[in-house]
Amino acid sequence: MKKKIIFVGVFVWGAVVMMSALAAISAEPVVSNDPKQQIEAAQRQLQIEHRYLHLPVRNGAPKQRMKFVVDDHTVRDFEIELADETPDFWVFSDVSPFLRQTLTIHMDSLPANSQGLASIAQADVIPGAEELYQEKYRPQFHFTSRRGWNNDPNGLVYFDGEYHLYYQHNPYGWNWGNMHWGHAVSPDLVHWNELPIALYPRQFGDWCFSGGAVVDWENTAGFKSGDEDVIVASYTSTGRGECIAYSNDRGRTFTDYEGNPVVKHRGRDPKIIWYAPGKHWVMAVYDELEDSRGIAFYTSVDLKNWARQSRIVEYYECPEIFELPVDGNETNKKWVVYAADGEYAIGSFDGKTFTKESGKHRFNYGNCFYASQTYSDIPPEDGRRIQIAWGRIGHRDMPFNQMMNFPVELTLRTTDEGIRMFAQPVKEIEILHRKDHVRENVILQPGENPLAGIKGDLFDIRVEWEIADAVECGLFVRGIPITYDVGKQELTCLDKIAPLKVEKRKITLQVLVDRMSIEIFANDGGIYMPIGVIPDDGDHSLGIFSKGGITKVNSLKVYELNSAWKY
């Protein structure tokens, strides 16, 4: 027996009052032995009059399949932990393409007493907009999505004054799933503006996995339709293979290439670069065979037709390849290859085959790094190789989950062990510098703390120690020790340990402190230790210490930081 209910819903988020449209719900019962828990298929019709639909989420609730249907076409299809009663938070779906049309929400199953479907509301702002970026554990200078889950950075490309950050995104929940490409842009790698989703899955189960993006300056693919140069994204369609999509509007929207997939194999995560000497494109893509994992290299002159050229083994997910000068010498360049864990090899590349000269070398020593990618198309006058990684840290009480590590500049430098890659935070961190505390030539005795009285959540700390007779020296950041063991020549934070040699009796640290992370760069970036951690709510102090003897602090600079979300 069908039931019809007509209702009007009123919802309040802060000062924003939202009225849901009149709707009809029809439900078809499904088998259930418990009448109180009767499961029903259900649907609701809405006349779309506002930009967003707000959906209630409760972490840990049973996942429900939800579809949006317009004119008998499924336009959204995803899973959601729909809140039957009081939600933990609200997510949103941008339905502006369907304004003034009738949209039907289909649920495959729904408890008979659930209020989840009935509570879905329309509005022109996102839920909780007045508190956005002010939440207790929201990082203040690391990118996080407004709502939902993020993981791998995708499609890092610079174009027309903007750094594009696409990323793996579940817009409908706190956990991994429903993979879309989220999108944000920045003029300076610090201030981010989140834009509408860039890539939607073609259908349920055919998710948009990781990939890269390039500017097709010569229009080799023929996708250009106006005066604007074309951004081409490469991504894995989990139902088809390696695909490309193109944008003629500065990366805001993409059109899927009708000839997709361009490569079909067992693998994922295509990263495309332009190989100038050969005047062709190169795709580095994770490639999985029965007996090995690795990176395969393909070439193309038009981004559409690809030829397999070579393969290297013992790499897993999210491959990357780029060229860097050694010690800044443009006449002496080496190629770097790595995958998701960041462990890298150095060698040569002829546009088809990578030849290893050294490595793998460890890149980071933290607990908060995975699936990094570097920017393509950085202008030659800048010339930096800029990397962003997925920062794996979240908090269950928040409406977002995970973050991006702060962007770093990569360089190759000669060390006693050979050529190695260094990582330093991009100079744009200085945009956020607010109040500074500077000390120089301090003879630090055990028990002394020149930083006593400085409190806060956001810091850029820079210190140079000259090792004397101390056994240990280091910092306390909101109660969390960063310790250098002089005898072992080891740097420790939490349970992570990195080798750190004294150089001319000195060591240096730069430490970026945010609400859910402490990123440590030692000896000018020779050691990179990104730490995901949520400090004690009651401790906002800083400290510098020496144990077992004195340490000379040649230079100590503590910069309090502004929030990147407050312009």
Image: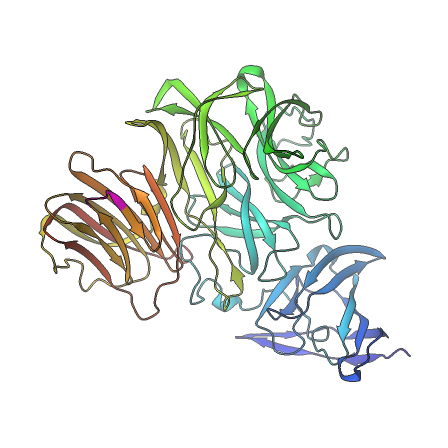
State whether residue 333 is above or below residue 37.
above
Residue located 74% across and 40% down the image: 240
State whether residue 434 is above or below residue 526.
below
Q: Quadrant of residue 538?
A: bottom left
Whether residue 519 is visible here, answered yes or no, is no
Whether residue 123 is visible here, answered yes or no, is yes
Please provide percent x and percent y for residue 370.
49, 45
Q: Identify which residue, 141 or 94, lies in the foreground.
A: 141
Please provide percent x and percent y for residue 458.
32, 57
Q: Residue furthest bottom?
A: 36
| Left/right of residue 106 with respect to residue 242 in the rendered view | right
Does 327 appear in magenta?
Answer: no
Residue located 46% across and 43% down the image: 388
State whether residue 35 is above or below residue 77.
below
Q: Residue furthest front?
A: 291
Q: Quadrant of residue 94?
A: bottom right
Read off the magenta span. 486-490
* Colour scheme in use: rainbow
Please provide percent x and percent y for residue 67.
76, 61
| Left/right of residue 93 with respect to residue 195 in the rendered view | right
Quadrant where the N terminus is found in the figure: bottom right
Does 488 appear in magenta?
Answer: yes
Name the main secondary structure of what is drawn in magenta: loop
Quadrant where the C terminus is found in the figure: bottom left
Residue located 57% across and 62% down the image: 174
Please provide percent x and percent y for residue 221.
68, 26
State whether residue 429 is above or below residue 241.
below
| Left/right of residue 218 with respect to residue 163 in the rendered view | right
